[in-house]
Image: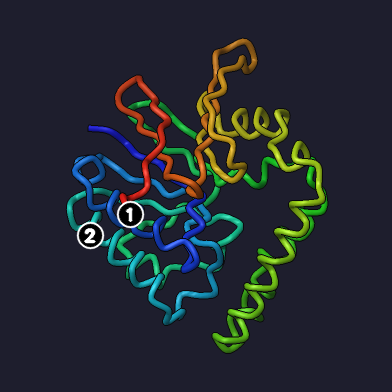
Amino acid sequence: MSTLFIADLHLDDARPDITTLFERFLASDEARSATAFYILGDLVEAWIGDDDDAELPERIAVATRGLRDAGVSVYFMVGNRDFLLGPAFAERAGMTLLDDGTVHAIEGVPTLLMHGDVLCTDDVEYQAVRAQVRTEAWKTQILSMPLEARRAFAAKARSDSKSRTGRIDETIMDVNQGAVEDAMRQAGVRRLVHGHTHRPAVHDFTLDGVAAQRIVLGDWYDHGSVLVIDGGQADLRGLALPAG
């Protein structure tokens, strides 16, 4: 049986076809025959708290819980868009939360799992903001706000992010190879799987004289993307949108 990985779906009411693709894929024979299913962050465009009463979180929970109930272990790691997702929703959705930088044996190979944003060390401005919003004090302050205020805050944050992305050099937002190697060296692994950069690829390189591999998951904007690891094979492929 295979192990499946996805990331960077950015599910949002504005793109209902992607949500439908997500639901159908989790209900597919391929997903339900997997050993494990990993979601490595940015499942949604914005997560405003586990108490969100909108329709989308419930649809996600139904899909992931259904996969878990079919006998597949479902793991979730927060990204930069959904870092407010916590244990309450994870339990409701049948998902096991993972810390960023977790090492799991995937098909017998120790593999470092990350969202990927901490590897983008050349983007100094982003790293400073990330450090601020990940503090417990900041999260507590945001989650204490009424839902509507949080929705407005999230909308402004998305707008600001799009504006910044449009004016910054794309190379700055990619991972730093030195940071990649340091993370893998510290974890004691020769394979890393991450998302965040929206640059799906399999990178083979040499780490301290030994063959190493970094696999970057694709985003779910124009189509879906899944990494399938089955035995010694890693297949990074796209998923077509539902007809119509």
**Residue shown at the point (37%, 48%) measured from the top left:** 241
Q: What residue type is labelled 1?
A: Gly
The answer to which of 137 and 169 lies nearer the viewer is 169
Query: Where does residue 172 sit, x and y in percent of width and height?
Result: 78, 40
Question: How are the colours assigned in the image?
Answer: rainbow
**Residue shown at the point (42%, 45%) measured from the top left:** 224
Question: Mark 2, residues whose alpha carbon is within 10 Å: few (<14), some, or many (≥20)?
Answer: some
Check the image and report above or below for 131 versus 106.
below
Residue 178 as seen in the image, left or right of residue 185: right
Question: Mark 1, residues whose alpha carbon is within 10 Å: few (<14), some, or many (≥20)?
Answer: few
The label number, if any, that marks residue 188 in the structure image: none
**Residue shown at the point (33%, 45%) measured from the top left:** 37
Residue to which mark 2 is pinned: 66
Residue to which mark 1 is pinned: 244
Check the image and report above or below for 210 versus 186.
above
The residue sitting at the bottom extreme is 146
Query: Where does residue 132 sit, x and y in percent of width and height?
Result: 74, 64
